[in-house]
Structure formats: C-alpha cells, structure tokens
Image (cartoon, helix red, strand yellow):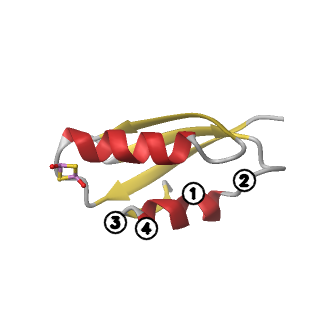
C-alpha cells in the first residue's frame, strides 16, 4: 500500500533545512520516500498509511522547527 502526499513547508531558510526535513521524514516508519523543495517550500512524501499518517509527518516537521500543512 503506497500513497503520496504533497505538503507546504514554511520556515526553511537554507538548503540544509530541506535536507534535515528529508532525513527526518525518511526515517519515519512507513515513509518510503521524502523529497523537499526549498525554493518551492514544498515536500513530497510516499508512505504507507497503515504505518504512518500525514498528521505524524506534520508533527515531525514541527518538532524539527518548521511548519507543515497539506498542500491544497
Ligand atoms: Mo541552515 Mo536550517 O544553517 O534549520 S539548516 S537555516
């Protein structure tokens, strides 16, 4: 089971911010791929909803010091 979600991510100021978030999301259980775009202030995550939720991802982003939301 694999789903994909697009996120808006606020608060990134350098490219290492984007890498921090990619690494943080990638190591979560159920996340198979995470790509963050600094300039676009977005992220794309492939995940298994049986193991991780979008709310978990947003919580993780907040814990790292940024703001995440589902892209509308
Ligand atoms: Mo760059 Mo981001 O020095 O948390 S890593 S500002």
The response on whether ligand 1 sits within 8 Å of label 3 is yes
Residue at mark 2 to residue at mark 1: CA–CA distance: 8 Å
- The disc, 4 or 1, on the residue closer to the chain's N-terminal end is 1
User: Measured from the top left, where is residue 30 in percent x and y?
Assistant: 72, 43
Residue at mark 4 to residue at mark 2: CA–CA distance: 16 Å
- The disc, 2 or 3, on the residue closer to the chain's N-terminal end is 2
Provide the secondary structure element on which disc 4 rests: helix
Q: Label for residue 65?
A: 3
**Left or right placement of residue 48 versus residue 65 in this view:** right
Residue at mark 2 to residue at mark 3: CA–CA distance: 20 Å
- The disc, 1 or 3, on the residue closer to the chain's N-terminal end is 1
Pointer 3 with pointer 4, Cβ within 8 A = yes
Q: Which residue is mark 2?
A: 52
Identify the image quadrant of residue 56: bottom right
**Left or right placement of residue 54 versus residue 63 in this view:** right
Q: Which residue is mark 1?
A: 57
Q: Is residue 43 visible?
A: no
**Vertical position of residue 64 compared to residue 33: above or below:** below
Q: Which residue is mark 4?
A: 62
Residue at mark 4 to residue at mark 1: CA–CA distance: 9 Å
> What residue do we see at 27% from left, 47% from top?
17
Pointer 1 with pointer 3, Cβ within 8 A = no
> What residue do we see at 70% from left, 46% from top?
29
> What residue do we see at 62% from left, 47% from top?
28
Mark 4 residue crowding within 10 angstroms, few (<14) / some (14–19) / many (20+): some
Residue at mark 1 to residue at mark 3: CA–CA distance: 13 Å
């Amino acid at each position: 089971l694999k789903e994909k979600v697009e996120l808006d991510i606020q608060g990134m100021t350098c490219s290492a911010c984007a890498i921090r978030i990619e690494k943080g999301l990638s190591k979560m259980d159920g996340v198979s791929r995470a790509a963050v775009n600094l300039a676009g202030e977005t992220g794309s995550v492939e995940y298994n909803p049986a193991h991780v939720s979008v709310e978990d991802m947003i919580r993780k982003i907040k814990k790292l010091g940024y703001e995440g939301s589902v892209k509308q």
